[in-house]
Amino acid sequence: MAAPRLSATAQAHANIALAKYWGKLDDAENLPATPSLSLTLDRLFSRTKVSFEPGLSEDTVVLDGTRASEPRRARVSALLDRVRKLAGFGHRAEVRSFNNFPTASGLASSASGFAALAFAATHAAGLELAPSAISDLARQSSASAARSLFGGLVELGAGERVASPLSPASPLDLRLVVAVVTAESKAVGSTDGMRLTRETSPYYGAWVAHAPAVFERIRAGLLEGSFSAVGEATEQSALLMHASMFGADPPLVYLSSTTFAILERLRSLREAGTLAYGTMDAGPHVKVLCLPESVARVVSSLEEIPAVRETIICAAGPSAHLIEAPV
Ligand code: 2P0
């Protein structure tokens, strides 16, 4: 093991699942019940600095310039505890992190946040871990974070501990246009939402049973370079997942009327020959999957919808890495 340098800053990029993870096989181990396949994005990222300091009495966590709430601090400390155990020291840490996009609004901030935290903390502690081992650490905090350790298209199987890049690489050069609908925080966090869906929705079992077939269609379409097959199955994965949430008691509805207006617009675009497909996470934003030649038409069409605040054009982004920039 290298001598710990005690401080490191990492950048990890957000990812959006084409095949969705929603539900856990095991709460304690945080193992996903459905296989997922995501695209890591170039434009959305978290930067996190971790400094272990021998004199500190507790971990301090500052997110986007504000001291983190106790539940968030505890979630960060749980990951740091696993790193401290591996490193064989007890130093508490100062953590500073910022996202270049709204936190906790269904734009996948926990994925990039915990991936950047795991990457920075393991390097600060002087641990020389393979990316897959860091992916495992990140997954225990947030399963989607396991995927943000890697760039491009990344998969995480049901019940698996570690994500891996899709291999061989897909010939498709994908774009994801994020249509930002609101900057408000989501009412129910993903972990609680998944538990509620599993415990109360009559559609949860159907979702978990059907998700592997949709995942396989997306995976096969990516490997074959069939964009329409990928897009159709991507939209279906999101709608099946949200259908399982609609069945929860009380119902879990992250989508808004603007979400449906956007999906309708995409259907019109497809009828007119522009292939574009939507996917939604734990928030009302729609992420539109398309090919480079369709980006301009998709953006101008989305921007005609008054409730669309902003569009962010993303391509495949890099794996997590160390940076020198201040946080
Ligand atoms: C995904 N989402 O595959 C799915 C689609 C949101 C909808 O993974 O409980 O923050 O921390 O493991 O990873 C968001 O859930 O949940 C998520 P935990 P996480 O991207």
Image: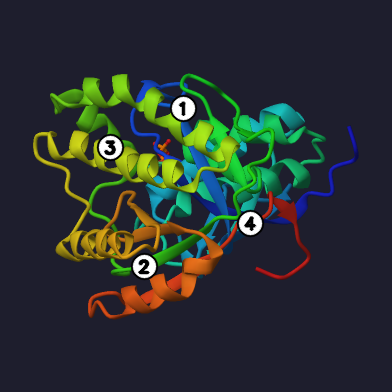
Which residue has dot 1 on it? Answer: 216
Q: How is the image coloured?
A: rainbow
Relative side of 259 to 40, left or right: left
At mark 4, the secondary structure is loop
Q: CA distance from mark 3 to mark 2?
A: 19 Å
- Residue 289 is situated, as x and y percent measured from the top left of the image, at 44, 56
Q: Which amino acid type corresponds to the residue marked 1 in the rendered image?
A: Glu
- Residue 299 is situated, as x and y percent measured from the top left of the image, at 41, 74
- The mark closer to the camera, 2 or 1, is 1
Judging depth in this view, the residue of 220 and 142 nearest the camera is: 220
Residue 100 visible in the shown view: no
Q: CA distance from mark 4 to mark 1?
A: 23 Å
Residue 241's label in the rendered image is: 3
Q: Which amino acid type corresponds to the residue marked 2 in the rendered image?
A: Ala
Relative side of 136 to 143, left or right: right
Q: Quadrant of ligand 1?
A: top left
Q: Which numbered disc flags the more N-terminal residue, 3 or 2? A: 2
Which residue has dot 2 on it? Answer: 179
Q: CA distance from mark 4 to mark 2?
A: 18 Å
Q: Which numbered disc flags the more N-terminal residue, 4 or 3? A: 3
Judging depth in this view, the residue of 87 and 23 nearest the camera is: 23
Residue 317's label in the rendered image is: 4
Q: Which amino acid type corresponds to the residue marked 4 in the rendered image?
A: Gly
Q: CA distance from mark 2 to mark 1?
A: 27 Å
Ligand 1 within 8 angstroms of badge 3 C-beta? yes
Answer whether labels 4 and 3 touch (C-beta < 8 Å).
no
